[in-house]
Amino acid sequence: MTEGLRVELDAGALWITFDRPERLNAFTGEMADRVAEEIEEAAARDEVRVVVMRGAGGAFSAGADLSGADAHENFDVSALDRANRIVRAITTLPKPCVAAVNGVAAGVGCSTALACDLVVAAESASFLLAFARIGLMPDGGASATVAASIGRARAMRMALLGEAMPAKEAYDAGLVSHLAADAEFDERVAKLVRRLASGPPLAYAATKKAVNAATLDRLEEALERERSGQTVLLRTADAAEGMRAFSEKRRPAFRGE
């Protein structure tokens, strides 16, 4: 059992729940590895018809765990590799993958949600690519998935300014597939999951493969570009300052170093 993660199979649906509500379900390395493993293994499990990811408490996931005064020393390229593994697992899984976003989805939490085939957002949810706030760039394939969904201009706004996009705006822009009132969110997700779990698996697999090939045909290149760029940025003084400022809850002073 992995701390901070719950995995349950129910009526054909594999529910993966990020369960660190006290940290807004921020990913640890162990959590990220287990998420990727569960999705990869689901490909060969006939009893799994759909994979669902959700967050416990009031958030989906705040992204990588940057808590602690020495976060800049512990956060390295291995975190990118874990994020990329999750995104590859989601996009190559020959089964529908649903993100049930009940609150904030930030950083790699946002990247993970947007890699899914369907995203159900509660009205109180929001989507945030906060990488620039700590001197980094989007990863987890977000440079490809966000632009593919909402276009270059909105993608740049999210990535460069680190502005949160509320669920209603995300739905109107085409970033997410479903919008639900908070009071109706759980039932909306459950109804969608039941429909997918009883649907035609071969048709779903072929459809997902075709749509991803048409819209995310350069995802692998994007993942490699992000890895290369982020590896360089992680060595900068700006990234160290950004992570320290995040931990200390203050504005960073970036110097371009």
Image: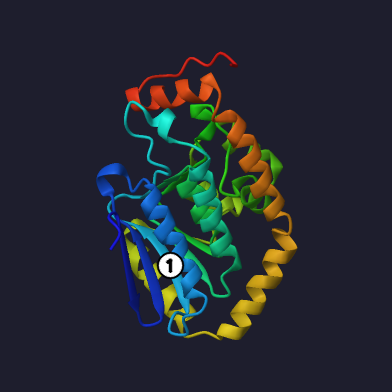
Q: Which residue is denoted by mark 1 in the rendering?
A: 38
Q: Position of residue 250 (x, y in %)?
A: 37, 20
Q: Position of residue 86 (x, y in %)?
A: 51, 57
Task: Pick the residue in front: 100 or 144.
Answer: 144
Give the side of residue 27 with respect to residue 195, left or right: left
Where is 203 relative to 182, above or below?
below
User: Which image quarter is the C terminus in?
Assistant: top right
Element type where label 1 sits in the image: helix
User: Which image quarter is the N terminus in?
Assistant: bottom left
Where is 226 relative to 204, above or below?
above
At horizontal 57% and vertical 40% (from top left) the residue drawn is: 138
* Image quadrant where residue 233 sits: top right
Give the side of residue 18 with respect to residue 117, left or right: left
Where is 219 relative to 67, above or below?
below
Task: Pick the residue in front: 40 or 166.
Answer: 40
Give the side of residue 205 with respect to residue 184, left or right: right
